[in-house]
Image (cartoon, helix red, strand yellow):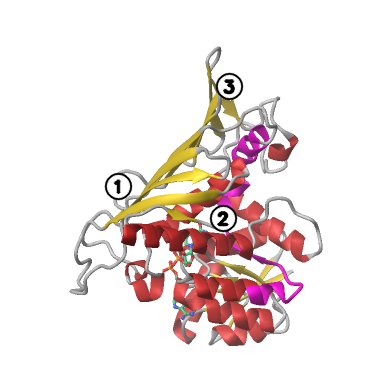
Amino acid sequence: MRAGIIGGGMIARVHAHAVRASGHEVLAAASRDRASGQRAGQETGAKEVHSTSLELIQNPCVEVVHICSPNDTHPDLVRAALEAGKHVICEKPLATDRADAQAMVDHWRSTDLVATVPFGYRFYSSVRELRARLSTGEDTPHLVRGTYLQDWLSRPTDTNWRVDSAQGGQSRAFADIGVHWCDLLEFVTGQRITSLIADLSTVYDTRGTSSEPVRTEDAAMLVFRLDSGTLGSVAISQAAPGHKNDLRIAVDTPVHSYEFHQEEPNTLWIGGREQTRIWNRADEDASLLSTAYDQSPGGHPQGWRDAFTSFVADTYRAARGAEVDGLPTFDDGLRAAVLTDAVLSSAASGRWVHIG
Ligand SMILES: NC(=O)c1ccc[n+]([C@@H]2O[C@H](COP(=O)([O-])OP(=O)(O)OC[C@H]3O[C@@H](n4cnc5c(N)ncnc54)[C@H](O)[C@@H]3O)[C@@H](O)[C@H]2O)c1
């Protein structure tokens, strides 16, 4: 199939690699204007460059539109792509507020197109293994814990379009990375966060050379309950020096404790009273649900780009009519917007928020 990629930044390059690695073609690129579109063409290796994103969407040869531009641009681009009858991969967060995310889902549901959101951590073999182990019913979680820590915004000189709430949305750290953690937790446990209390913190009053006050959070702390009543907590920060992409999910059950660490994604830590072990991808007791996501033989490490490639490959399989298990769709993008809304409203009120 032929892809058109909008945006030429960090994640657009990962999308372009994933399209090719899963056997498809990066046909076209576009960005904010002609000049940035040319750069996007170079970054993604696209054959054609369009002057505008709408021109790319209307290119009759583009079958799947990848939206890899800042958050505030997503709703209009998704609307145009769905109206043009194109399958869509739209980066998270779907929109800068819940109402727009809901409208995008309503529009998608009125079509028979495939629309996915890159919650790519779902596509590690080790994550599928954890999900398979937790789905047997024998290991029921009674406590879930975790962190998602980064350091790329830990200095006052560090800044990015995400800091500006008009482009990134009212929430930054939670909407940018916290939603990945929550998606992964709900994915591996098969449970939903039904209530939460959250607080937010912002480290610097201003950032970079701007005198504009920073209105988006650097860090978030959540305590929550899952629908089974299980208690959980997570700390999220983009200002934790030395933590590059330190996503950890720990699940305690009466029999085992499990820990997935994104920076060591080929393994799972499995704790037990009689024995504690490091499970390795491609161990002989690996579930078939996890080996389906092995892209190389055991002992050859797989990483984030491989998981992302599996996500793109599954999206394209779905676009060709296949039934795909565990594909993050626009419904999951809306779920992230609902949780972000709950986090912001809990932080503003200081109260528990129930999530319907
Ligand atoms: N799924 C993930 O794991 C993941 C990881 C990183 C980023 N993201 C998401 O991807 C999106 C892009 O993030 P990034 O880190 O690549 O940003 P980036 O700043 O590296 O790149 C943004 C790109 O968008 C282009 N752009 C700016 N305004 C535009 C417009 N109006 N129309 C079209 N293009 C425009 C810029 O020229 C640039 O090429 C964000 O929504 C972000 O949340 C997701």
Label annotation for residue 240: 1
Find residue 173 and report its image quarter.
bottom left
Range covered by the magenta-colored residues: 106-134
Q: Characterize the local packing of mark 3: few (<14), some (14-19) or many (20 or more) Cα atoms within 10 angstroms.
A: some
Tell me how far mark 3 sits from mark 1, CA to CA.
33 Å
Q: In this view, does 70 lie above or below 175?
A: below
Residue placed at 37% from the left, 57% from the top?
346
In terms of sequence position, does the residue under pointer 3 or pointer 1 come before the other? 1
Tell us which disc is closer to us: 3 or 2: 3
Q: Position of residue 265 (x, y in %)?
A: 53, 39
Residue placed at 59% from the left, 64% from the top?
16
Q: Which quarter of the image is occupied by the C terminus?
A: bottom right
Tell me how far mark 3 sits from mark 2, CA to CA.
29 Å
Which residue is under mark 3? 255
* In-image side of 43 versus 107 (left or right): left
Find residue 158 and report its image quarter.
bottom left
| Residue 126 appears in the rendering | yes
Question: Looking at numbered disc 1 in the image, what kind of residue is underneath it?
Answer: Ala
Question: Looking at numbered disc 3 in the image, what kind of residue is underneath it?
Answer: Val
- Callout 2: CB less than 8 Å from ligand 1: yes
Indicate whether residue 132 is drawn in magenta: yes
Q: Position of residue 215 (x, y in %)?
A: 28, 68
Q: Characterize the local packing of mark 1: few (<14), some (14-19) or many (20 or more) Cα atoms within 10 angstroms.
A: some
